[in-house]
């Protein structure tokens, strides 16, 4: 049993006052959860402290919130670990008074600090009361946006659909989602662009794109690529991967949607996402390292077609990047010819470029996707055993 | 200390001052760098998005080249670190998959071996704290950055995902910039954006979102009283520094905050002159940093 301080961001709309911070002291075993701490405070100190929860076992997805600034499930976060994290982090920039001569620093403490565990409602969502947020506009509406049900063609079978078990393995990761909204809360793209469809809904979209029973995968991909706030609006910050309590890795599912969209030949998205990716991949095959001038040119005006008939978006993109390039020339950042003229950037030296090309040929033929979530990690490296083949016989 | 050194693409492209300042700083620290000049781009997550096996093989090649030197590997780019760690995690997860990847490398006389001679690939920031040591760094300081208020900016790829980036073993990797700033005698500025995204990955795809991210973080750091930012990621530098005047237009406020590469900040404390460290090549003026340090003799 130990005593912890919870610093809770509270908001009581009926009071007419703005949000405020309130600290609660709770006594708990370190292996119990932050949610247990909140419920103890509600029970013993203030029954009006509002929190949404149900199963307390990371199954229902109700108690999404921020603990020490990280989006998570409060029931899955051990209070002892949260306390150590708060002390490492100097949460909220607060540094408590130094310890007395005979005091021991608390566990995990940097320079003897003992910080409260900071508890806040989820981010990117309007707060209704205390730790309760309105998930409708930023979560559920976006989930509905991706048509989260199966779209098979033809008459339904007499009994159930029969599919190979292996063909469903690919979508098991995205099926693990419990709709808690932690990924949405943490999403840094949505913070800058509230219209972004977001990690939860896009992971859900992959669940159907990858389902062998769905007959409209290509239409789904086309829709999500052509929405300017769709798959190409993810800024690749990994926040959702860390936030997800169920290992869904939403960003990985978004990258798979991009891969599937490109494989389906969808190359005219308004964000220029496909063209940028294709230009980058091609450039490394040719040059081995980044030829910035070539990348800019080929991202906006790929190949002969892109140069003869550039799109409106491409012209706009190029024009808007001009002032940046001019400033870089002025300071000497981009004064060398190889940084200004596409294609004169040197290849890798001494035959190394051919090695890269050989890797491309091999990998583009196999295109193996190794998903650790599904295949797991080997615990112990097996020792090479030369007699193994003989024994098998 | 001798290391296999992967400088990455951007440090030889639009942020050439990073490559130069790393060379200066390494010499001052007594670190010998063996540059992997035959190595290829890490793929920056984009190649993995297109074809995971391709990204894994390209980076296995880089690791194999580093392993040939028998040295630990160092990079100076958060994005390289993240993209390479992602591939290394898959390569290390399964011997059959690794053998498949090594098939093509063997034709080039290369092989990536899991854990060979304790092989590691670390960003300069991690290496500085974990292997070089901040006490040793502090001893080398000839111009303490006294009074310089520095905002850390990590870059997503060295902060998340924690499970992949060795946070189990090194739980304070997301505090190393603060520790380094303090070891150099500077003052840490706390602000909201230190571990957020600079927006660079979507600069060609959603320019406004991208620049809003960069502009917001620079603005927050200014409001918190920063004299400059420091970053171990050249791609963050492109959005925070090179695009700063454009970001200012999107967030509709004046910015003008110097953004230093990590080796530049270390180099300044080790006695380097701003010009030597390529600070004149930046878009956001670094004059203010020079003024703050002018009173401190090198």
Image: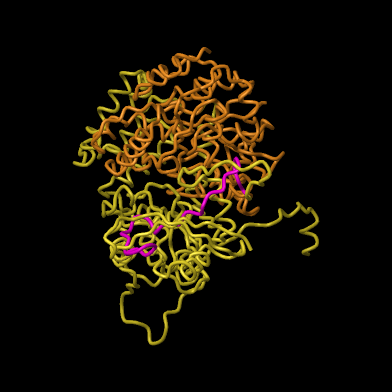
Total number of numbered labels?
A: 0
Colour-to-chain, yellow: A
Residue A146 found in image quarter: bottom left
Residue at the extreme top of the image, as rendered: B297
Name above or below for residue B212 compared with residue A292. below
Q: Position of residue B203 (x, y in %)?
A: 32, 39
Judge by depth and name the residue closer to the eye, A293 or B199. B199
Q: Is residue A7 magenta?
A: no
Residue A226 found in image quarter: bottom left
Colour-to-chain, orange: B
Name above or below for residue B176 compared with residue B228. below
Name above or below for residue B262 compared with residue A213. above
Judge by depth and name the residue closer to the eye, B212 or B229. B229
The quarter of the image holding the N terminus of chain B is: top right
Judge by depth and name the residue closer to the eye, B33 or B192. B192
Q: Position of residue A227 (x, y in %)?
A: 26, 54
Q: Position of residue A17 (x, y in %)?
A: 29, 57
Q: Residue at x 27, y 23 (%)?
A: A326
Q: Residue at x 59, y 18 (%)?
A: B28
Which region is colored magenta?
Answer: A108-134
Magenta-colored segment: predominant secondary structure: loop
Q: Is residue A133 magenta?
A: yes
Judge by depth and name the residue closer to the eye, A362 or A295. A295
Name above or below for residue B284 compared with residue B86. above
Q: Residue at x 58, y 56 (%)?
A: A81
């Amino acid at each position: 049993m130990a005593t912890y301080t919870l610093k809770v961001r509270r908001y009581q709309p009926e009071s007419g006052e703005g949000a405020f911070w309130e600290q609660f002291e709770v006594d708990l075993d370190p292996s119990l959860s932050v949610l247990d701490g909140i419920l103890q405070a509600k029970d013993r100190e203030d029954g009006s402290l509002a929190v949404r929860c149900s199963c307390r076992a990371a199954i229902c997805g109700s108690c999404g919130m921020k603990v020490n600034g990280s989006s998570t499930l409060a029931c899955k976060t051990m209070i002892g670990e949260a306390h150590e994290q708060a002390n490492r982090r100097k949460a909220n920039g607060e540094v408590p008074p130094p310890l007395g001569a005979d005091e021991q620093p608390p566990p995990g403490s940097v320079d003897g600090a003992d910080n409260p565990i900071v508890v806040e409602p989820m981010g990117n969502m309007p707060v209704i009361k205390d730790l309760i947020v309105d998930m409708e506009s930023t979560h559920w509406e976006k989930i509905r946006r991706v048509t989260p049900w199966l779209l098979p063609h033809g008459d339904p079978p007499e009994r159930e659909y029969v599919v190979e078990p292996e063909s469903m393995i690919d979508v098991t990761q995205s099926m693990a989602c419990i709709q808690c909204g932690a990924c949405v809360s943490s999403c840094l793209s949505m913070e800058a662009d509230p219209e972004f469809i977001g990690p939860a809904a896009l992971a859900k979209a992959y669940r159907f794109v990858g389902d062998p029973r769905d007959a409209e995968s290509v239409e789904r991909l086309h829709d999500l690529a052509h929405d300017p706030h769709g798959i190409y609006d993810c800024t690749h910050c990994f926040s959702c991967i860390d936030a997800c309590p169920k290992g869904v890795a939403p960003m990985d599912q978004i990258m798979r949607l991009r891969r599937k969209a490109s494989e389906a030949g969808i190359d005219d998205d308004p964000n220029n996402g496909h063209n940028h990716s294709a230009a980058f991949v091609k450039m490394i095959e040719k040059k081995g390292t980044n030829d910035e001038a070539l990348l800019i040119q080929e991202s906006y005006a790929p190949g002969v077609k892109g140069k003869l008939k550039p799109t409106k978006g491409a012209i706009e993109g190029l024009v808007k990047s001009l002032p940046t390039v001019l400033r870089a020339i002025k300071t000497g950042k981009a004064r060398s010819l190889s940084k200004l003229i596409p294609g004169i950037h040197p290849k890798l030296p001494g035959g190394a470029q051919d090695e890269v090309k050989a890797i491309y040929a091999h990998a583009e033929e196999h295109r193996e996707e190794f998903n650790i979530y599904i295949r797991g990690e080997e615990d112990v490296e097996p020792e090479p055993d030369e007699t193994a083949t003989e024994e098998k016989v | 200390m001798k290391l296999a050194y992967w400088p990455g693409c951007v440090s030889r492209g639009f942020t050439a001052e990073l490559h130069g300042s790393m060379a200066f700083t390494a010499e001052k620290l007594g670190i010998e760098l063996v540059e992997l000049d035959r190595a290829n781009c890490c793929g920056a997550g984009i190649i993995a998005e297109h074809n995971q096996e391709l990204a894994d093989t390209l980076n296995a090649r880089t690791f194999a080249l580093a392993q040939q030197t028998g040295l630990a590997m160092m990079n100076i780019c958060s994005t390289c670190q993240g993209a390479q760690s992602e591939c290394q995690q898959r390569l290390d997860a399964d011997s059959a998959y690794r053998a498949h990847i090594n098939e093509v490398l063997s034709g080039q006389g290369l092989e990536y071996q899991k854990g060979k001679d304790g092989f590691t690939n670390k960003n300069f920031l991690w290496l500085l704290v974990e292997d070089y040591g901040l006490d040793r760094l502090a001893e080398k300081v000839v111009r303490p950055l006294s009074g310089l208020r520095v905002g850390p900016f990590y870059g997503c790829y060295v902060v998340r995902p924690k499970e992949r980036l060795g946070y189990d073993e090194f739980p304070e990797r997301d505090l190393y910039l603060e520790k380094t700033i303090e070891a150099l005698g500077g003052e840490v500025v706390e602000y909201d954006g230190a571990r957020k995204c600079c927006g660079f990955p979507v600069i060609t795809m959603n320019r406004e979102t991208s620049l809003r991210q960069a502009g917001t973080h620079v603005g927050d750091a200014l409001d918190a009283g920063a004299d400059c930012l420091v970053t171990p990621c050249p791609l963050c530098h492109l959005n925070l520094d090179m695009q700063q005047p454009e970001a200012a237009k999107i967030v509709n406020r004046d910015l003008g905050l110097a953004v230093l590469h990590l080796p530049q900040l270390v180099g300044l404390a080790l006695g380097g002159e701003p010009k030597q460290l390529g600070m004149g090549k930046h878009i956001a003026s670094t004059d203010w940093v020079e003024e703050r340090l002018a009173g401190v003799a090198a």
